[in-house]
Image (cartoon, rainbow, N blue to C red):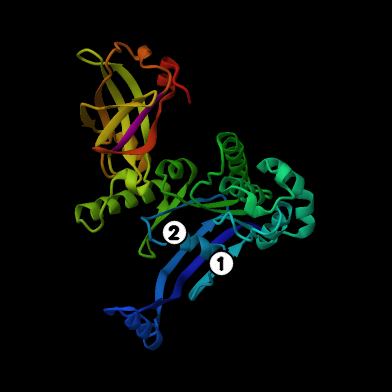
Amino acid sequence: MSAYIRLDRLCLDVPIFLQQERESKGWAGIFRGAAFDPPKRQLVRLLDNLSFEVREGDRLAILGRNGAGKSTLLRVLNQVYRPSSGTLDVHGSCQALLNMSLGFNGEATVRENIFLRGVAMGLRAAFLRDQVSSILEFSGLAHKASHRLRTLSSGQKMRLGFAISTSVQHDIMLMDEWVGAGDADFMERAKERMQDRVGGSKIVVLASHSVGLLRDMCNKGIVLEGGRLVHVGDITSALKRYHGMMAQLRAENAITIEPIESQGAQVYGVVEEIRPGEGEGAFVLKGWMVDTEGATPRGLVLEIDGRRHVAESIQYVKRPDVVRHLGLSDDECGFLATVRVPGASCPAQLGDFLRVLGGVSGELGDASLRLGPAVLAALRVSP
């Protein structure tokens, strides 16, 4: 039978315990408050009246700002949380890449932890016995098989969890952000396996702040705000609604946007051309960029071999093609930026290692804009 996910008026309430605020002048007052004024139990609604359906072949994006309920919804779909009311119907085997350390025990060996995590995922011991060798080989931990898990680094534990989680193909895949696990060599293998598992899944549900990834990977989208469903539709309309909502919140000062670097947001885009500008050492960069909130960053830097050259001026231009593709609300996401690099007169003299960084003016984000293929070929820029 076909795989599907159906939610009908689903709500999730969880208990929290609140301590009454009171002023204490010493340790005695604190101890009296703890003894005679215990925390009060209160129910908080995390998901409110969600109704939608995901059918076989769908790739669903979950959009929303931090705290909107994206990760909570994924855990409900994986049946970690039981709905307080309403119904959830999930048909098909389900694989969730949400918690890479689920089932791990630091005092058990690496080999034993393969069985512990596998059983926690619902896999049979007989199946896991046949997978042990391939899991150890894929994670690069065959030489650590008899070592206790607590002796491994965090990166090695992440690699082990990823290898176990993706050792079997399921009908439904749930992901909270695109999984990153380990060094460059492992990341390449992990990316290939992820693409294979995503391609083999009948349904994929992905929550991410990488709008470019969601646009390329998903065909449908939902938007959450405060645990409520505010939009269901195709990915373009969902992205447009999300960016519109974020733009409205910024305009009304309903939320505070911190500098990109401090909140770990991403800037993505494309540098389509680098050409000589007017004056000694001047270059003009043409392209587009946007951050994960749908806003256009107002600062740009060209980094050459680790040295950063801040753009002297940036002219923003309309890019309706990008707006249509990503469902943006700000049509002036294109840019023509002038950067001055002393001692260089043509793009070929800029070197082999270039990065373009975008962010809040004076507070640049770490994420790079990727260079377009034509520019990569012309400038011999390392990937």
N-terminal-most mark, 1 or 2? 2
- Looking at this view, is 61 or 268 the one in front? 268
Q: State left or right for residue 149 relative to residue 298.
A: right
Residue at numbered disc 1? 80
Residue 251 on the magenta segment: no
Residue 332 position within the rendered picture, expressed as x and y whole percent measured from the top left: 24, 36
- Looking at this view, is 277 or 79 the one in front? 277
Residue 285 position within the rendered picture, expressed as x and y whole percent measured from the top left: 29, 23
Residue 170 position within the rendered picture, expressed as x and y whole percent measured from the top left: 65, 53
In this rendering, is residue 103 above or below 271? below
Magenta span: helix, strand or loop, mainly? strand
The residue sitting at 47% across, 63% down in the picture is 72
In this rendering, is residue 278 above or below 74? above
The picture quadrant where one finds residue 191 is top right
Secondary-structure class at tag 1: loop
Range covered by the magenta-colored residues: 354-359
The residue sitting at 35% across, 64% down in the picture is 226
Residue 356 on the magenta segment: yes
The residue sitting at 70% across, 61% down in the picture is 119
Crowding near the residue tagged with mark 2, few <14, some 14–19, many ≥20 C-alpha atoms within 10 Å: many
Residue at numbered disc 2? 70
Tell me the amino acid under the disc marked 1.
Answer: Val
Q: State left or right for residue 110 relative to residue 6.
A: right
The quadrant of the image that shows the N terminus is: bottom right
Secondary-structure class at tag 2: helix
Residue 158 position within the rendered picture, expressed as x and y whole percent measured from the top left: 58, 48
Tell me the amino acid under the disc marked 2.
Answer: Lys
Answer whether labels 1 and 2 touch (C-beta < 8 Å).
no
Q: Residue furthest bottom?
A: 36
